[in-house]
């Protein structure tokens, strides 16, 4: 009996070592590929302050300035490469490109300051403890908090005049994406001891639970509020197929946002909301076999087609959105560590999704981005089936989380 036990233990040890070696090789291969691609992107930068965002129609790199909502993702990706590889080159490039965003700390023009600063300065502080980064993050949270309104009890997303494609004009638009920017507020409260930022984040998250979600835990993209009464003027989409369809990246933003809120607060209602959203995504009947979603979960369902369908580009393809998949993947690795009852399911789904993205969505048509086949804004025929910097960012974040979780086994 003792010999059988020893033999069984030896077999288990061999299997575990084999899995660890396989995971290590998988991570190393994808990190090396990302280094190759993003090194080309760094070398393509011709002017300080310009960040690679996507590929233009002529297949050259499309750059954006500091005030574009995606500006923080490229330096954030470089910070993740430094973390994954230990290569000082990436630390230097991350510091250089992060510095280009210093002026954003005082920007109050939209809610995306959270994306701009958390991805760049937030990761930079986490990896270097640079006190100057901490100060910038606190100042950024103060700027973001000016967009909170005590009547609506949410942070306003956009200031631009406009509205839906079928005529509704915004008054106080709040998008599900805004959940992602709450992390900056939690960081600032931790750094400064000022609970104001944390309280705003919690109130925004609670109001969003109440007003943004349908009974099946799919999310509306936009909720428009009345600035005088705080009442809801309507629920709409701006980037999804229709007002009642489920825009894939919106679902991912909601999942990530509530997972982050659950982690930061320990609030069971936030954890439950994250679990509900995860289950909606994982078990959606329109989810493809490789788990990378269509750009909208109802993209093939003509019952959801809006009256303004003629304004969309021809829907000859049900485009995938790798960016929605990477956000979901990164969130599920975190959620797997928070959920007592479903953690193993979330981890297995995230691991499978990460492998599918790595095997089937790595860039082959360009040398500057890690992944391809993302959709930015299909209703505006903008960035359709292209690489996008935030897909790369959350993919590398998922790799970091996967590496940390496998090394702790």
Image (cartoon, helix red, strand yellow):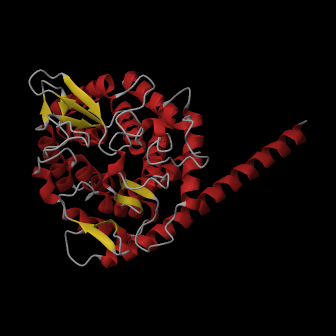
Residues 221 and 268: in front is: 221
Is 94 located above or below residue 329 in the figure?
A: below
Q: Please state if 229 lies on the left or on the right of 322 as rendered.
A: left
Residue at position x 44%, y 25% from top? 272
Quarter location, residue 132 = bottom left
Q: Position of residue 284 (x, y in %)?
A: 54, 35
Residues 131 and 124: in front is: 124
Quarter location, residue 98 = bottom left
Quarter location, residue 78 = bottom left
Image quarter in which the C terminus is found:
top right
Image quarter in which the N terminus is found:
top right
Q: Position of residue 235 (x, y in %)?
A: 28, 30
Q: Position of residue 342 (x, y in %)?
A: 56, 30
Residues 93 and 51: in front is: 51
Q: Position of residue 258 (x, y in %)?
A: 37, 33
Residue at position x 49%, y 53% from top? 320
Is 69 located above or below residue 336 in the figure?
A: below
């Amino acid at each position: 009996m003792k010999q059988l036990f020893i033999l069984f233990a030896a077999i288990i040890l061999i299997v575990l070592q084999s899995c660890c070696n396989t995971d290590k090789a998988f991570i190393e291969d994808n990190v090396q590929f990302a280094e190759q691609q993003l090194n080309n992107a760094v070398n393509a930068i011709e002017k300080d302050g310009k960040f690679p965002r996507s590929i233009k129609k002529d297949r050259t790199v499309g750059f954006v300035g500091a005030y574009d909502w995606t500006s923080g993702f490229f330096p954030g990706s470089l910070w993740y490469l430094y973390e994954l590889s230990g290569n000082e080159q990436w630390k230097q490039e991350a510091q250089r490109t992060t510095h280009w965003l210093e002026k954003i700390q005082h920007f109050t023009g939209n809610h995306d300051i959270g994306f701009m600063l958390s991805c760049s300065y937030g990761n930079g502080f986490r990896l270097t403890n640079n006190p100057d980064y901490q100060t910038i993050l606190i100042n950024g949270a103060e700027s973001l908090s000016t967009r909170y309104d005590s009547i609506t009890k949410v942070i306003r997303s956009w200031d631009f005049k406009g509205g839906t494609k079928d005529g509704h004009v915004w008054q106080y638009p709040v998008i599900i994406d805004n959940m992602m920017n709450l992390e900056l507020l939690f960081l600032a409260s931790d750094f400064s001891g000022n609970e104001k930022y944390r309280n705003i984040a919690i109130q925004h998250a609670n109001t969003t639970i109440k007003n943004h979600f349908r009974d099946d835990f799919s999310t509306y993209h936009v909720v428009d509020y009345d600035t005088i009464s705080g009442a809801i003027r309507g629920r709409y989409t701006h980037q999804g197929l229709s007002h009642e369809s489920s825009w894939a990246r919106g679902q991912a933003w909601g999942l990530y946002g509530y997972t982050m809120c659950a982690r930061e607060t320990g609030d069971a209602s936030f954890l439950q909301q994250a679990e509900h959203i995860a289950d909606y995504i994982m078990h959606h009947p329109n989810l493809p076999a490789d788990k990378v979603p269509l750009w909208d979960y109802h993209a093939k369902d003509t019952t959801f087609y809006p009256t303004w369908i003629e304004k969309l580009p021809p829907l000859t393809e049900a485009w995938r959105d790798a960016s929605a998949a990477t956000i979901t993947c990164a969130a599920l690795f975190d959620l797997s560590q928070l959920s007592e009852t479903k953690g193993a399911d979330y981890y297995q789904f995230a691991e499978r999704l990460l492998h599918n993205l790595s095997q089937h969505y790595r860039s082959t048509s360009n040398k500057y981005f890690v992944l391809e086949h993302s959709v930015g804004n299909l209703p505006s025929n903008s960035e359709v089936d292209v690489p996008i910097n935030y897909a790369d960012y959350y993919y590398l974040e998922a790799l970091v989380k996967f590496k940390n979780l496998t090394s702790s086994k």
